[in-house]
Image: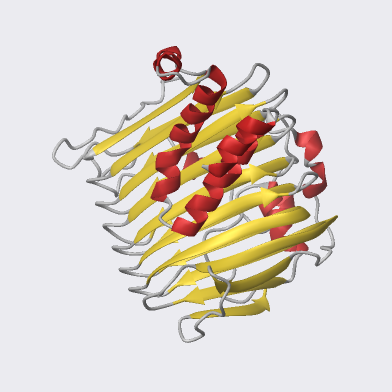
């Protein structure tokens, strides 16, 4: 029998992005569906779940009847009522547009979230916002609940949105972020759940043509928090800046996964996540994925993760992934690290008369300070730094607690 001839595609050096890559990308292989049974039950052998303590979130693997205990309210950041000519809140059926319009669920828990609820909360903004909009998501118990939230931003809108999670909850959450053409907005998601809370979330993000989005995630509370963010561009010259801050304490599992897809020319993305871990069995996971598709020349992409381990016992998983299917790019790169305090930095501070304990706290404040400032909402930035200071003050003397909490 004659051997079958194998034809290997040859790229055109004058048009390196005209021919798709010979090997399928992660996006090509990834299943997306609204049907729960299209996804296998998660196991640690699956790439998307190998860092996750599955036994702690198994209640989110099958469709459930939501409790309805999670409440959503919308106001200005200072607590005053919203300007309804620029900001509106509505509740629609789960299968009614714009709900479900940005991609599809990409794992079993996001499909379970979609099928467990029947309503979607839509927050729409337009025009020039005078101050940030606050979307308060408050849990009121540990009965399983589901929430689907759509943030819809009109063309040429400028403004900031803060979504704050607090209280006690076991919540499956889906978020869709839709930014219009030429819009310039920021979205900040803060997780300050009470002890005993669990939060499994999926965010699907659409950055409009020639739009910019600063997307920040700050996770400081909850026994188990697992958030996945998937993004796509809606046209050329989009700009995405993803910031992440997390502080895992004893027994907490905080997991963040980002997927940036460059599917249009001349778009830019930056992903920077930083985390600190303190206490026995504190566990953090960051998995960053960036894909540059053949049709996206002149892409500029970079992702970075830094982890600071404060005490013996925590585990930090950090995994950057970069797939490039296009030879005509401006730049693409990634970096990650897990480490302890810099001895030289500590020595310098101690040589100036600062005690070792105080020096460690100052290093951690500096570690987070630049990202917190980039969030761009002063009241939230001040609040977050105060929360981090209180975390650092735990276990210290009364005098040291006063020093930290006065900063």
Residue at the extreme bottom: 85
Q: Quadrant of residue 213?
A: bottom left
The image's colour scheme reads: secondary structure
* Foreground residue among 54 and 115: 54
37 or 235: nearer the viewer: 235
Residue placed furthest toward the left? 14
Q: Is residue 23 above or below residue 279?
A: below
Residue 355 visible in this rendered orientation of the protein: yes
Classify residue 105 by image quadrant: bottom right
Position of 129 compared to 258: left or right? left
Residue 49 visible, this orientation: no
Q: Residue at x 75, y 48 (%)?
A: 194
- Location of residue 255 in the rendering, given as x and y in whole percent from the top left corner: 62, 38
Name the spot of residue 165 as percent of width and height, x first. Answer: 65, 56
The picture quadrant where one finds residue 277 is top right
Q: Residue at x 36, y 74 (%)?
A: 155
Is 203 located above or below residue 161 in the figure?
Answer: above
Q: Residue at x 36, y 76 (%)?
A: 128
Residue 247: percent from left, percent from top:
60, 36
- Numbered disc total: 0
Q: Position of residue 166 (x, y in %)?
A: 69, 56
């Amino acid at each position: 029998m004659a051997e079958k001839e194998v034809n290997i595609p040859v790229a055109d050096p004058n048009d390196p992005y005209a021919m798709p890559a010979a090997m399928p990308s992660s996006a090509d292989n990834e299943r997306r569906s609204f049907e729960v049974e299209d996804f296998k039950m998660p196991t640690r052998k699956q790439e998307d779940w190998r860092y996750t303590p599955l036994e702690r979130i198994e209640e989110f693997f099958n469709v459930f009847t939501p409790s309805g205990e999670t409440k959503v309210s919308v106001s200005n950041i200072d607590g005053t009522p919203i300007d309804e000519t620029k900001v509106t809140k509505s509740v629609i059926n789960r299968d009614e547009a714009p709900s479900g319009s940005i991609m599809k669920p990409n794992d079993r828990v996001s499909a379970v979230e979609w099928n467990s609820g029947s309503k979607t909360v839509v927050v729409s903004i337009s025009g020039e916002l005078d101050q940030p909009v606050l979307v308060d998501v408050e849990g009121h118990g540990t009965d399983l609940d589901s929430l689907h939230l759509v943030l819809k931003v009109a063309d040429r809108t400028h403004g900031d949105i803060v979504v704050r999670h607090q209280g006690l909850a076991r919540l499956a959450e889906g978020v869709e972020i839709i930014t219009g053409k030429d819009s310039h907005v920021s979205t900040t998601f803060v997780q300050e759940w009470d002890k005993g809370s669990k939060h499994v979330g999926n965010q699907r993000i659409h950055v409009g043509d020639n739009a910019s989005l600063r997307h920040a995630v700050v996770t400081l509370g909850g026994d188990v928090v697992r958030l996945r963010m998937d993004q796509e561009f809606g046209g050329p010259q989009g700009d995405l800046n993803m910031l992440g801050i997390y502080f895992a304490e004893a027994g907490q599992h905080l997991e963040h996964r980002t997927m940036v897809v460059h599917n249009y020319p001349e778009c830019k993305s930056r992903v920077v996540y930083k985390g600190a871990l303190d206490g026995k069995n504190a566990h953090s996971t960051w998995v960053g994925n960036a894909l540059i598709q053949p049709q996206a020349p002149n892409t500029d992409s970079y992702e970075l993760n830094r982890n600071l381990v404060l005490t013996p016992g925590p585990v930090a998983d950090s995994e950057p992934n970069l797939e490039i299917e296009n030879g005509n790019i401006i730049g693409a790169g990634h970096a990650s690290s897990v480490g302890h305090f810099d001895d030289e930095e500590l020595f310098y501070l101690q040589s100036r008369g600062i005690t070792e304990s105080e020096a460690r706290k100052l290093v951690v404040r500096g570690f987070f300070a630049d990202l917190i400032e980039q969030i761009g909402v002063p009241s939230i930035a001040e609040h977050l730094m105060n929360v981090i200071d209180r975390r650092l003050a735990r276990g210290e003397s009364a005098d040291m607690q006063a020093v930290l909490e006065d900063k």
